[in-house]
Amino acid sequence: MKTPPESFLIFKEELKKAILEKERLQREYESKLANMNNELERLKEQIAAQQELMKTTLEYAIRLEENLDSFKVEVANAPTLKKKSFH
């Protein structure tokens, strides 16, 4: 049986190194992608919470405006009372 040429053995070793490097890079990529997805999910939750807060705030402001309008009407329709003097 013939011994393979030295260049073939070097090539084979370099190929193993390249495969290991590819696997390492793949794991690193998947890890970074998972971290980014987690961060994206947190950001989506924060945005949803902020949107809900804005919605609640707008609803509250609308109710206040409606109450103010009805109070203005009530004051306008109230009979004028004589001002009592302390003198």
Image (spheres, helix red, strand yellow):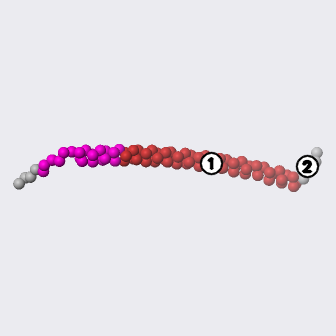
Q: Nearer the viewer, residue 76 or 57?
A: 76
Q: Which mark is residue 3?
A: 2
Left or right for 43, reference 80: right
Amino acid type at circle 1 is Leu
SS assignment at label 2:
loop
Mark in front: 1 vs 2: 1
Report the disc number at residue 69. Answer: none
Mark 1 sits on what residue? 33
Q: Residue at x 67, y 47 (%)?
A: 27
Percent of width and height locating residue 68: 30, 47
Q: Would you say 87 lies left or right of 15 here? A: left
Going by the image, does 42 lie left or right of 33?
A: left
Q: Are marks 1 and 2 in contact (CB under 8 Å)?
A: no
Magenta segment includes 69: yes
Residue shown at 43% from the left, 48% from the top: 54
Quadrant in the picture for the C terminus: bottom left
Identify the amino acid type marked 2. Answer: Thr
The quadrant of the rendering that contains the N terminus is top right
Where disc 1 sits, the SS reads helix
- Looking at the image, which residue is at 73% across and 51% down? 21
Distance from label 1 to label 2 (Cα)? 45 Å
Viewer-closest of 47 and 68: 68
Q: Which residues are magenta?
A: 63-83
Q: From this view, report whether residue 11 is shown above or below residue 63.
A: below
Most distant residue in the left direction: 87
> Residue 49: where, in percent of width, then height?
46, 45
Q: Position of residue 35 (x, y in %)?
A: 59, 48
Q: Report whether 2 appears left or right of 86.
A: right
Q: Measuring 56% from the left and 48% from the top, which residue is drawn there?
A: 40
